[in-house]
Amino acid sequence: MPRETGRKLIAQNKKARHDYHIGDVYEAGLVLTGTEVKSLRQGRASLQEAYATIDDGEVWLRNAHIPEYAFGTWTNHATRRTRKLLLHRREIEKLEKAVGDSGRTIVPLSLFFSDGYAKVEIAVATGKKDWDKRQTIAKRDADREAQRALATRNRLRR
C-alpha cells in the first residue's frame, strides 16, 4: 500500500477563532495509541473544549475527545485522556514565555493527518471580550454582503 501524502483535515475548532484573538500558530505531532489512530482515520474527533498546557517542559493536549474505536477490544483508549504534543525545545520555550503573560492560553485549532502522521495545530490565544465578538460578526457580515454585491454585479454584466 502506498504511503499517504498531503493534508487530510479531521477536526476543526471553529469556535476558537470566534472566542479568541489568535497569535502565533504551531504545528505539533501527537503521541497516540493504535485505536486512537484508527478512530481518527474514520474522521471522528472533537476539539470543542480542548486546550493545551505546559508541565515540566512538555506540552500536553487536554480534554480533546477522540471516541473509542468501534472494533476495538479491551485495549481501547479513554476518550478524553491527556495526550502529549511533540514540539521542538525552542518552540516549547516560546510557548512558555507567551503563556506566562496574563490572559493568554494555548488553544488547538485543528487536528489533521500530514503525510500520514497525526498533527494538531495549536495557537497562543487571548480571550475576546463581548464587544470584540460583535465586531468580528459585523465584519464577517459586511464581507459577505460585499461578496454578494460583487457576484450580482458580475452576473448582470454577462
Image (cartoon, grey):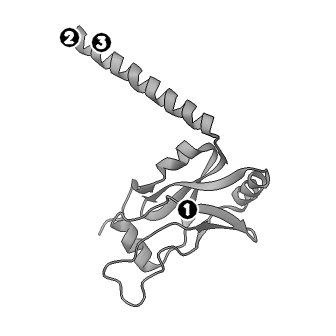
Task: Name the amino acid, label 3.
Answer: Arg
Circle 3 SS class: helix
Mark seen at residue 158 = 2
Percent of width and height locating residue 144: 40, 26
Residue extending farthest bottom: 74
| Contact between labelled residues 3 and 1, with CB atoms less than 8 Å apart | no
Q: Which residue is mark 3?
A: 153
User: Whole-Å distance between the Cαs marked 2 and 1?
Assistant: 48 Å
| Contact between labelled residues 1 and 2, with CB atoms less than 8 Å apart | no
Q: In the picture shown, does residue 24 fall above or below 75?
A: above
Mark seen at residue 50 = 1
Task: Identify the image quadrant of the C terminus.
Answer: top left
Name which residue lies at 57% across and 45% down.
19
Task: Identify the image quadrant of the N terminus.
Answer: bottom left
Mark 2: give few (<14), some (14-19) or many (20+) Cα within 10 Å. Answer: few
The front one of 6 and 157 is 157
Circle 1 SS class: loop
Percent of width and height locating residue 143: 45, 25
| Contact between labelled residues 2 and 3, with CB atoms less than 8 Å apart | no
User: Whole-Å distance between the Cαs marked 3 and 2?
Assistant: 9 Å
User: Whole-Å distance between the Cαs marked 1 and 3?
Assistant: 43 Å
Asked whether, in this view, residue 157 is left or right of residue 66, the answer is left
Q: In the picture shown, does residue 94 fall above or below 148?
A: below
